[in-house]
Every structure is written in C-alpha cells, then in structure tokens.
C-alpha cells in the first residue's frame, strides 16, 4: 500500500512523525513526501519551505520505521517514480 504527504501547510515535525507511525501501522509501505506549493494566490499559503536536507532526514526516519520505498523532496509528488517504489516493495 502507498500513501503521500504534502508538507509545508503548518504541520510540526512531531505531527509528521506520528503520521508516519500511523501510516506504517495501517499497512502503508511505500511513501512519498513533497513540498506543498500554492497554485495561486487565492489558495492556502505555504507556511514553511522544507529544505532538501530536512526531506532527507524525514526519509531516513521513514526507512527506520520500516517503509520499504520512500521518495522525499521539494518536488516529489504522489506518483513520483512510482515504478521504482513498487519495485522496492516486491
């Protein structure tokens, strides 16, 4: 099972860590994490920009939890390299 997170909407790291634990407990093994980018000025604004290094730290945390495939970075979207993630699960 796969899921994805968009970050930068005001969540705390502790909330992200809890979400990772909850997703893993629910059976999710493939995960994407990307930066929320407001498509227009009328959409919800970006609360914070997550650095590439912090995305690396979040990916490492997810792998430590046990996720078998993780794609994390500012430009990662829900189907980002999905074929490679699925190959890691099999």
Image: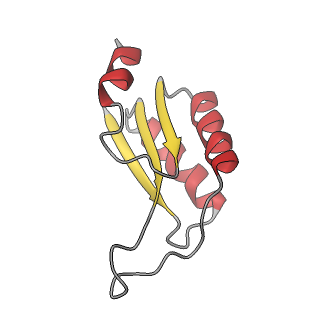
Q: Position of residue 10 (x, y in %)?
A: 55, 73
Q: Position of residue 22 (x, y in %)?
A: 47, 46
Residue in view at x 52 percent, y 42 percent: 72
Residue in view at x 46 percent, y 81 percent: 45
Viewer-closest of 44 and 66: 44
Q: Is residue 47 left or right of residue 81?
A: right
Residue in view at x 33 percent, y 73 percent: 39
Residue in view at x 42 percent, y 37 percent: 31
Q: In which quarter of the view is residue 59 placed?
A: top right
Q: Is residue 17 left or right of residue 68?
A: right
Question: Which image quarter holds the N terminus?
Answer: top left
Q: Position of residue 43 (x, y in %)?
A: 34, 82
Q: Up-down: is 21 above or below 45?
A: above
Among all residues in the image, which is located at the extreme top? 90
Q: Is residue 43 left or right of residue 70?
A: left
Q: In which quarter of the view is residue 61 placed?
A: top right
Q: Up-down: is 8 above or below 61?
A: below
Question: Which image quarter holds the C terminus?
Answer: top left
């Amino acid at each position: 099972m796969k899921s994805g997170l968009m970050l930068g909407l005001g969540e705390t790291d502790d909330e992200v860590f809890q979400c990772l634990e909850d997703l893993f407990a629910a059976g999710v093994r493939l995960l994407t994490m990307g930066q929320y980018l407001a498509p227009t000025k009328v959409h919800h604004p970006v609360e914070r920009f997550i650095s590439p290094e912090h995305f690396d730290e979040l990916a490492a945390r997810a792998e430590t939890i046990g996720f078998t495939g993780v794609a994390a970075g500012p430009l990662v979207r829900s189907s980002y390299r999905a074929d490679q993630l699925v190959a890691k699960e099999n």
